[in-house]
Amino acid sequence: PEGVGNNAQSPLDRMTNAKRIIIAACGTSAHSGLIAKYAMESLAELPVEVEYASEFRYRRPLIFPEDVVIAISQSGETADTLEAIRIAKESQALTIGIVNVVGSSIARHTDAGVYLHAGPEIGVASTKAFTGQVMAVLLVALQLAIQRNTISQEQLDSYCDALDGIPDRIEQWLEPLDKQTKFIAKYFRLASNALFCGCGVMFPVALEGALKLKEISYIHAEGFSAAEVKHGPQTLIRNFIPVVCIAMKSDPAYQAVKEHVSEFREKDAAVIVLTDEGNDDFKGVASFVIHCPASKLE
């Protein structure tokens, strides 16, 4: 606990009573930070800002002692994110680290934090770490929500049960998914560009999908919000270009995404839709439909 006597507060208490949370991260970690923003604002009703640490360090951010700065990093050694922590400490804000590598610089320099324990990331694409980061920020959001009395114990138990079942669902999904993605990959093997889109919490997932394609295949890919398609991205959609649309029924903008998928097909784009298990809304519309097992439709 920080402070003296009756004024002592744990990092969790300070987070619970914070006026604002700022998440500083780079690349994949910034995308998990965007998911954290959606989760913390919707569950814990806390205002959250997400900053690229590389931009954050080169301007004059307004940080107050009542703020909390969360640094997310796989390695825990990201130079820009470390600098963001230093700036936050100068303003006496609470600093929290979410890292994978035990004993890393970010873990040592923050006031408190969470270890992912996802194991070493061998490949260039930080896939395990991203999954671990998303799970970690969801757990933090849920803890803050129960502390702030914005969800009930029954709701918390429901969310925790859903999270607990995710590993088994993914394991059952991997074999059919592997066959389907190999078939789709052969179809698009000559593509030189790809687009990814999603709304709400699926927007950062679309950004992450585009980043992964760039990192692994060296193919130009761009992620954008499906709600923004009419403000520029639609000019890029043409014959054969692969467009990956994440369209979950729990998305408030689901109907709008459905309309966009139809428009993409009218432009002869090759549309790949990732949607809920058992959802046949895109049958005969999308070129390919990947059904994702749902854990909790909220």
Image: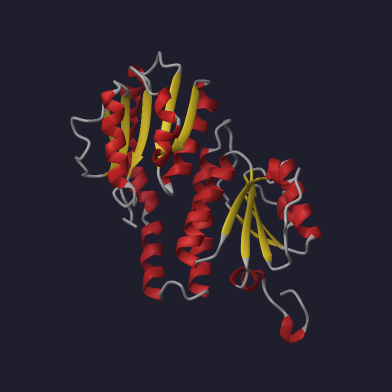
Give the image location of residue 4, x and y in percent.
Answer: 78, 81
Q: Quadrant of the C terminus?
A: bottom left
Task: Tell me if residue 74 can be seen.
Answer: yes
Q: Viewer-proximal residue, 36 or 266?
A: 266
The answer to whether one can see residue 292 in this image is no
The N terminus - image quarter = bottom right
Horizontal arrangement in the rendering, residue 99 relative to residue 6 (left or right)? left
Q: Residue 54 at what x, y percent from top left?
A: 70, 40
Looking at this rendering, what residue extends furthest in the right direction?
90
Residue 162's quadrant in the figure? bottom left
- Residue 112: x and y in percent read 68, 62
Q: Is residue 42 left or right of residue 265?
A: right
Residue 279 vs 42, above or below: the answer is above
How many numbered discs, if any?
Answer: 0
Residue placed most toward the observer, 234 or 181: 234
| Image coordinates for residue 176, horizontal then vertical, percent | 29, 34
> Please, is residue 4 above or below residue 216 in the view?
below
Q: Residue at x 58, y 44 (%)?
A: 30
